[in-house]
Image: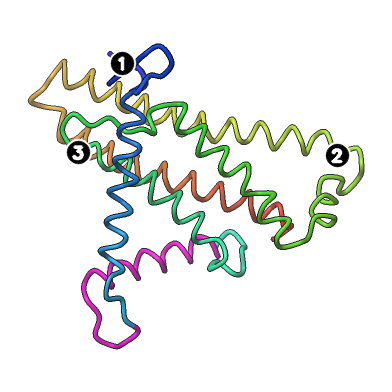
């Protein structure tokens, strides 16, 4: 039983290993980019819109409501980053219904990369909104003694983001494999459905936390 798709080596030489995580990640990126191009083709502001545009609008509006719900008053400024996080994690987790597919979010390297994106996005949006000087002042509020605690919190919450997503997806995959091996005719459908629900929930939690961290960087309520 594998803990991570990193263990599956597709190709290697003396300097580089191409593992399953890299392959599935790039597959998802290319597939999602192609789907985005197809869905946004022919988008119109008219009354009569296509079904695919209706679906797109539902997703965009839901993401804007999610971002606004954590206190970011202008969600259109953040939806590009936060929406991409949600869609990538959600599609990655939901694609487990495909045969022989293992989600890249079951690899700590992928979840760590996503968490590092959030780690970099927090000062990026904070500086863009407040300016460098005002953003840096948030590290010494309400007193200068809070500086080391703010710095430590930035690091620990990044580790927590990566570990939470990896742990939930990895453990879910292992439980599914174990139950299928024990009772292949009883558990698969129920466990797969539960796994899909868990995948969506984990994408939602990761996205909410990212939005909360960005809002906190700008002292948004």
Q: In this view, does 43 lie above or below 123?
A: below
* Secondary structure, magenta segment, majority class: helix
Residue pictured at 41% horizontal, 64% vertical: 62
Q: Identify the residue position indicated by label 3 in the image.
A: 97
- Lateral position of residue 65 relative to residue 35, left or right: right
The range drawn in magenta is 45-68
Give residue 74's mark: none
Counting residues from the N terminus, which is met first, the one under dot 3 or under dot 2? 3
Q: Disc 1 versus disc 3: distance between alpha carbons?
A: 18 Å
Foreground: disc 2 or disc 1: 1
- Lateral position of residue 100 relative to residue 211, left or right: left
Res 166 → quadrant? top left
Q: Identify the residue position indicated by label 1 in the image.
A: 2
Judging from the image, what secondary structure is the residue with disc 3 in?
helix
Residue 48 inside the magenta-drawn segment: yes
Residue pictured at 31% horizontal, 32% vertical: 23
Counting residues from the N terminus, which is met first, the one under dot 2 or under dot 1? 1
Counting residues from the N terminus, which is met first, the one under dot 1 or under dot 3? 1
Q: Disc 3 versus disc 2: distance between alpha carbons?
A: 47 Å
Residue 63 inside the magenta-drawn segment: yes
Q: Identify the residue position indicated by label 2 in the image.
A: 146
On the image, the x and y values in percent for residue 182 come to 16, 15
């Amino acid at each position: 039983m594998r803990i991570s798709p990193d263990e599956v080596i597709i190709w290697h030489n003396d300097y580089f290993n191409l593992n399953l995580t890299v392959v599935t990640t790039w597959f998802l990126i290319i597939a999602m980019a192609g789907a985005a191009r197809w869905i946004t083709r022919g988008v119109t502001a008219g009354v009569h819109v296509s079904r695919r545009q209706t679906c797109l609008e539902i997703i965009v509006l839901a993401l804007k409501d999610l971002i606004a719900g954590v206190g970011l008053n202008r969600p259109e400024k953040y939806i590009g980053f936060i929406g991409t996080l949600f869609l990538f994690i959600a599609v990655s987790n939901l694609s487990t219904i495909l045969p022989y597919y293992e989600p890249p979010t079951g690899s700590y390297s992928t979840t760590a990369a996503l968490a590092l994106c959030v780690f970099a996005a927090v000062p990026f949006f904070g500086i863009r909104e407040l300016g460098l000087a005002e953003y840096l002042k948030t590290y010494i509020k309400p007193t200068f003694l809070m500086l080391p605690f703010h710095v430590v919190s930035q690091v620990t919450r990044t580790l927590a983001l990566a570990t939470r997503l990896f742990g939930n997806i990895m453990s879910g995959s292992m439980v599914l494999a174990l139950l299928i091996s024990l009772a292949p005719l009883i558990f698969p459908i129920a466990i797969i459905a539960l796994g899909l629900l868990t995948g969506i929930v984990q994408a939602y939690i990761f996205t909410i936390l990212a939005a909360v961290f960005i809002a906190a960087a700008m002292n948004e309520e």
